[in-house]
Image: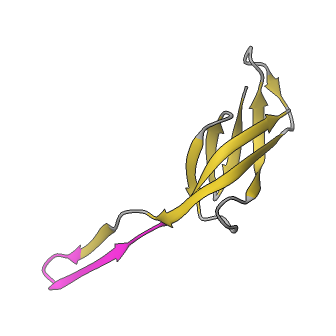
Amino acid sequence: MHAIIETGGKQYRVAPGDVIRVEKLAGDIGSEVELAVKAAFKEGGELVSGGKVTGTIVGADRAAKILVFKFKRKKQYKKTIGHRQSYTEVKIGDVVV
């Protein structure tokens, strides 16, 4: 059984036991979280409405730095900035339909 969840403005396809990286969630490592379900599917691919997905926070960190370079030709304008996105790793526990 798997489900499609939505968190942080993005959608993820999850099954029990998966570990996914999502946008930063409030909570400590080891705490339980409940994720919003968009759709759930049974073994035969049958679509089921509703459902509940629970998970455990297993880690939280920041991703590798991404450099952003802005440039305008003939104007002597150059600007370099970096960005590190925060994320939370969640291990999917139960997918209840």
Residue at the farthest bottom position: 76
Q: Is residue 14 visible?
A: yes
Q: Nearer the viewer, residue 88 or 76?
A: 88
**Percent position of residue 57, x then y:** 65, 56
Q: Is residue 72 above or below residue 29?
A: below
**Percent position of residue 93, x then y:** 72, 41
**Percent position of residue 30, x then y:** 68, 58
Residue 60's image quarter?
bottom right
Q: Nearer the viewer, residue 89 or 9?
A: 89
Specify how the rendered protein is coloured. Answer: secondary structure
Give the magenta-colored segment's residue range: 71-85
Is 50 in the magenta? Answer: no
Q: In this image, 75 relative to 91: left or right?
A: left
Q: Is residue 80 above or below residue 15?
A: below
Q: Main secondary structure of the magenta part?
A: strand
Residue at (87%, 38%) from the top-left corner?
A: 50
On-image quarter of the N terminus? top right
Q: Is residue 91 above or below residue 63?
A: above
Q: Is residue 87 visible?
A: no
Residue 96's image quarter?
top right
Q: In this image, 68 relative to 75: left or right?
A: right
Residue 12's image quarter?
top right
Q: In this image, 47 relative to 16: left or right?
A: right
Residue at (77%, 38%) from the top-left corner?
A: 94
Residue at (16%, 76%) from the top-left corner?
A: 73
On-image quarter of the C terminus? top right
